[in-house]
Amino acid sequence: MGRILAIDYGEKRTGLAVSDPMKIIANNIGTIKTAEIFDWFKMYQIKEKIDEIVIGYPKRLNNIHSDICVSIDKFIADFSEQFPSIPVILYDERFTSKIAFRVMIDAGLKKKSRQNKALIDSISATLILEEYLNFVKNKQK
C-alpha cells in the first residue's frame, strides 16, 4: 500500500508532507529547494511507494487562480512527463499559510520561529494533506 505525498509548491522552496501507508495521518517531512524536487522525488520513491500526489492550488477569494498557478501548471506538466503513472490531484489551498501561521502561534512558537517561511511551507503542506485525507474519508461515507 502506497502513500500520498502533498506538495505546497513555491518558486524557491516547496513544503512536503506524506501520509502513512493506511492514508489516515499526515506527516510533515519538511521543505526542499524547488529546483531539487524531481531529484528528491526519484530518491524518495526508492524508499516509499507513492500512489498519488496532492498539490496545493491556490485561489483568491473571488475564485480566480493565484499568479503562482502558472508555475504550478508547468510543474505538474513536467512531473506528469517524468512520472506518468502517478496521478496528480489539485487541491484548493486557500488560507493554508494563514492557518499554518495560526497553528504556530497556538503551539507557542516565538516570533522568530514564526518568521521561518520554510516552517510555514511545511506546515501548509501538512494542512493540505490533512484536509485532502478528510475529504476522501468523508466522500467514502
Image: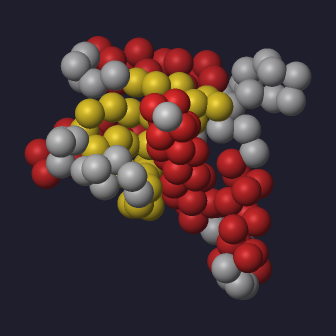
Query: Which residue is found at the position 49% from the left and 18% from the top?
Result: 74
Residue at 43% across, 56% down: 26
- Furthest-right residue in this view: 62
Q: Nearer the viewer, residue 58 or 130?
A: 130
Residue 48 is situated, as x and y percent measured from the top left of the image, at 18, 48
- Going 73% across and 56% down the picture, which residue do you hit? 99
Q: Give above or below for 64 relative to 109.
A: above
The image quadrant that residue 57 belongs to is: top right
| Count of labels in the image | 0
Please identify the residue farthest to the front as the structure is shown.
Answer: 141
Can residue 126 be seen in the rendering of this structure?
A: yes
Q: Please, is residue 35 above or below residue 80 in the view?
A: below
Nearer to me, 91 or 46: 91
Residue occupying the point 76% across, 66% down? 102
User: Percent x, y for residue 93?
Assistant: 65, 38
The way the protein has been coloured in the rendering is: secondary structure
| Residue at the far left in the pictured view | 46
Would you say residue 132 is visible in this rendering?
Answer: no
Q: Which residue is nearer to you in this view: 11 or 96?
A: 96
Relative image position of residue 126 (x, y in whole percent): 51, 54
Give residue 49's position: percent from left, percent from top: 18, 42
Q: Quadrant of residue 20?
A: bottom left
Is 30 rendered above or below residue 6? below
Q: Is residue 124 left or right of residue 86?
A: right
Q: Quadrant of the N terminus?
A: top left
Q: Quadrant of residue 81?
A: top left
